[in-house]
């Protein structure tokens, strides 16, 4: 008697799982890793840009984060949400990397052009202004302490206070007051520099 | 002028490099993880083979030599070879990195503890590695000097070998305890500096 395709597939998966649980674990780990990367790669690259000024360092840091995630996947128990767990790992790896980072003696390189180009409706003057503001914001964030930087980045990535609490270990009230101060500081940096460039 | 959404928009509008092929990324992380494991395994294997060779060679010399001082010295060196193998197998494995899934304060404490352990390991090299080997060589050398003195062959050149290996040992001590520990202390201070206020969060 011929079994239906779905039945045969599930029997095959069971047989593989019984014979080689390690193989199954590796396959599952690979699937989780690929899914996480597809979902969070742009956010992780933005995070790397907040810790490393040079393009080569940013790429190294991104790879370090990817390795950190790969190694941490088997120990993920689901106590925290996947997103907060991922950001914890990324920030902690970034701190370790910053500790070991050697000065490469190169000038800061701007972020490469976006793969999704900005809307054509935006005039070139506006584009220049926007790029300038982005650079100022990035500089402002890089100048923050590790904890402030972590909180600011998580907030900018759209995480709420409860999620930031899970990642940083700070209370939500402390996060709220710190965020208010940080937002003011970052706005000030952008506004002051904007005024200075207009005055020139 | 800038509300939260504007800052967020500004942040998220950053151009980022084109997405890496996930297949390539998987290959890359697997290669990097395997390379690291292989490096540690090979380093330990090399050191164990060298220590085993030291044990065999100096054990044979201890068996064949007549002078008591030399015999004790060679035996001590051979025993140190075995001790080094034990120490490498017991403590020489790459310590597991701190769990990056911890919150910032927990991660900082784990990272600092890791640095403290590495500093302790490097600072202890003089006791478990250098001192027994140097003592063994010194004792064996005393035996040699006694033999030379007895047969009238003692001269300034007799002290050349002890001077050279003592200088060599001093250099290894400096590499570990001054250079290595200094570098680790710098990294440890940097961790504390980078995470300065994570220890006293509200």
Image: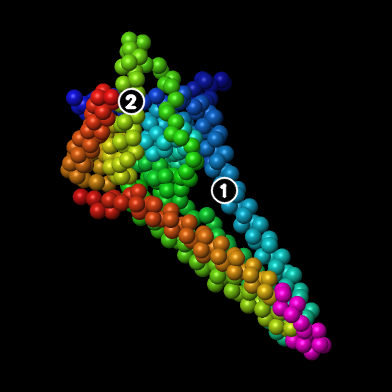
Disc 2 target residue: A132
Which secondary structure dominates the residues rendered in magenta?
helix
Residue A109, picture quadrant: top left
Which stretch did the figure color magenta? B146-161
Q: Residue at x 36, y 10 (%)?
A: A120
Q: Quadrant of the C terminus of chain A?
A: top left
Q: Secondary structure at mark 1?
A: helix
User: Does residue B96 belong to the magenta stretch?
Assistant: no
Horizontal side of residue A80 vs B81, given as left or right: left
Q: Is residue B67 visible?
A: no
Disc 1 target residue: B37
Tell me which chain the residue with mark 2 is part of.
A
Residue B15, position in %: x, y?
39, 24
Q: Residue at x 66, y 78 (%)?
A: B138
- Residue B156 lies, with reference to residue B119, above or below; the image says below
Residue at far top of view: A121
């Amino acid at each position: 008697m011929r079994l239906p395709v779905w039945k045969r597939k599930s029997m095959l998966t069971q047989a593989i799982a019984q014979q080689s649980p390690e193989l199954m674990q590796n396959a599952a780990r690979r699937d989780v890793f690929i899914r996480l990367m597809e979902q969070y790669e742009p956010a992780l690259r933005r995070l790397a840009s907040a810790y490393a000024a040079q393009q080569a360092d940013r790429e190294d840091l991104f790879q370090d984060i990817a390795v950190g995630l790969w190694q941490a996947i088997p120990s993920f128990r689901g106590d925290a949400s996947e997103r907060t767990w991922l950001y914890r790992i990324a920030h902690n790896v970034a701190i370790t990397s910053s500790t070991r980072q050697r000065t490469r003696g190169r000038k800061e390189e701007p972020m490469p052009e976006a793969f999704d180009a900005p809307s054509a409706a935006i005039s070139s003057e506006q584009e220049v202004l926007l790029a300038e503001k982005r650079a100022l914001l990035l500089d402002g964030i890089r100048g923050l302490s590790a904890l402030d930087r972590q909180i600011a980045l998580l907030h900018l990535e759209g995480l709420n206070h409860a999620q930031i609490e899970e990642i940083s270990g700070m209370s939500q009230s402390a996060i709220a007051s710190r965020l208010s101060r940080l937002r003011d500081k970052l706005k000030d940096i952008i506004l002051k520099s904007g005024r200075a460039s207009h005055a020139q | 002028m800038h509300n939260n959404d504007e800052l967020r928009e500004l942040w998220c509008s950053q151009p980022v490099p084109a997405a890496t092929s996930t297949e390539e990324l998987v290959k890359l992380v697997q290669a990097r993880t395997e390379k690291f494991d292989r490096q540690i395994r090979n380093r330990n294997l090399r050191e164990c083979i060298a220590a085993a060779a030291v044990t065999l060679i100096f054990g044979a010399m201890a068996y064949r030599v007549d002078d008591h001082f030399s015999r004790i010295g060679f035996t001590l060196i051979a025993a140190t070879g075995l001790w080094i193998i034990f120490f490498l197998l017991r403590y020489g494995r790459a310590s597991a990195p701190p769990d990056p899934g911890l919150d910032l304060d927990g991660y900082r404490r784990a990272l600092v503890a890791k640095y403290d352990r590495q500093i302790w390991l490097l600072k202890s090299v003089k006791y478990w590695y250098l001192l027994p080997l140097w003592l063994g060589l010194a004792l064996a050398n005393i035996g040699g000097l006694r033999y030379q003195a007895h047969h009238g062959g003692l001269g300034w050149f007799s002290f050349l070998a002890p001077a050279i290996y003592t200088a060599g040992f001093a250099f290894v001590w400096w590499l570990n305890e001054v250079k290595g520990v200094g570098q680790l202390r710098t990294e440890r201070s940097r961790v504390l500096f980078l995470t300065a206020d994570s220890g006293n969060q509200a």
